[in-house]
Amino acid sequence: MHKLLKIYIGENVRWQGQPLYRALVLKLKQAGLAGVTVLRGVEGYGQQKVVHTTRLLELSADLPMIIECVDTAEKIEAVLPDICQMVKRGLVLTTDINIVKRG
């Protein structure tokens, strides 16, 4: 069985002197996960209900970031404690998935 790990954080969140999204990518790579994608949102808001956007007139520096990873349930579950420790403010979720095509 495979799982999707999805992490929602702000672009400006840091972990030990580097952007958290970068630290998460390195942690997932170190844990041997198959691959990771980081997506930068163009607009969004979180728990505080503050809208962050890339629109020029309302330029925000703290855009939403989404980190996604697909791998076996075992590998995802093994790295979750470290991920949850690193993500102090954000959302971490997993869901079971079926891989339909691998290319």
Image (spheres, rainbow, N blue to C red):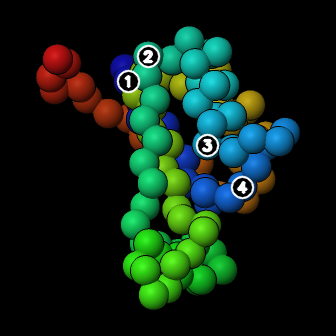
In the image, 70: left or right of 67?
Answer: left
Give the residue type that dot 3 points to.
Answer: Tyr
The image quarter containing residue 86 is top right
Gap in Å between the C-alphas at discs 4 and 2?
Answer: 25 Å
Q: Given this view, does label 3 or label 2 mark the residue nearer the observer?
A: 3
Q: Residue at x 15, y 22 (%)?
A: 101
Q: Earlier in the sequence, mark 3 or mark 2?
A: 3
Secondary structure found at label 2? loop
Give the residue type that dot 4 points to.
Answer: Val
Q: Position of residue 100 (x, y in %)?
A: 16, 26
Which residue is outermost to the bottom? 57
Q: Are marks 4 and 3 in contact (CB under 8 Å)?
A: yes
Give the residue type that dot 1 points to.
Answer: His
Pick the residue in front: 102 or 80.
102
Instruction: Let me know if residue 74 appears in the view.
Output: no
Q: Earlier in the sequence, mark 4 or mark 3?
A: 4
Secondary structure found at label 1? strand
Residue under pointer 2: 34
Q: Position of residue 24 (x, y in %)?
A: 64, 34
* Circle on res. 13: 4
Up/down of 40 relative to 25, above or below: below
Q: Given this view, does label 3 or label 1 mark the residue nearer the observer?
A: 3
Q: Residue at x 58, y 30 (%)?
A: 25
Residue under pointer 3: 21
Which residue is outermost to the front? 56
Q: Residue at x 71, y 55 (%)?
A: 13
